[in-house]
Amino acid sequence: MGFQTEFNSVCKFKSEQELYELLEYGRGKMVKSGFRVFPTGQKVIAYTPDNRAIAIVKIMSSIAEINFQGEEVTEVEMVLVRKLNEEESRVQTALAYEMFFGEQA
């Protein structure tokens, strides 16, 4: 049992539903496997499941726990600051591939 830090691609959504809720309602949450440390109170870039930068979000809370199935999970709640425009998204996506995701196909 240990914590992993998530300061890089902190808001890479794995679920389209979680991303939809954030963009539609201005608030949302995502659940990540394992115990992780998220930068609560900071603004970060949110990425779609296909690694495209889409928005700036502010991390409101991060709760690491063992769920009823015995799995280590971290739930992160966030608010939408604003969606990125096309140019911002293109630049942030390119930087993320160079820094975090590896080479773009």
Image (cartoon, grey):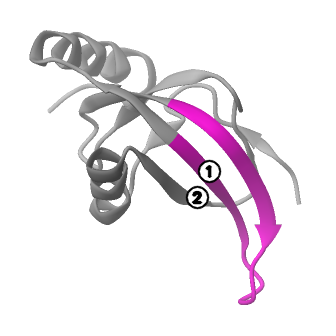
Amino acid type, mark 1: Val
Q: Which numbered dot is residue 32? A: 2
Q: In which image quadrant can residue 58 be found?
A: top right
Amino acid type, mark 2: Lys
Local crowd size for mark 2, using a 10 Å CA cut-off: few (<14), some (14–19), many (≥20)? some
Q: Residue lying furthest front in this view?
A: 25
Could you tell me if residue 2 is visible in this image? yes
- Estimate the x, y position of residue 35 in percent, counting from the top left: 76, 55
**Circle nearer the viewer, 1 or 2:** 1
Q: Circle 2 — which element? A: strand
Say whether residue 25 is left or right of residue 58: left
**Which segment did they paint magenta?**
58-78
Could you tell me if residue 102 is visible in this image? no
Residue bearing the label numbered 1:
76
Q: In which image quadrant can residue 95 be found?
A: top left
Q: Circle 1 — which element? A: strand
Residue at image coords 24%, 21%: 84
Quick check: marks 1 and 2 in contact, CB under 8 Å? Answer: yes
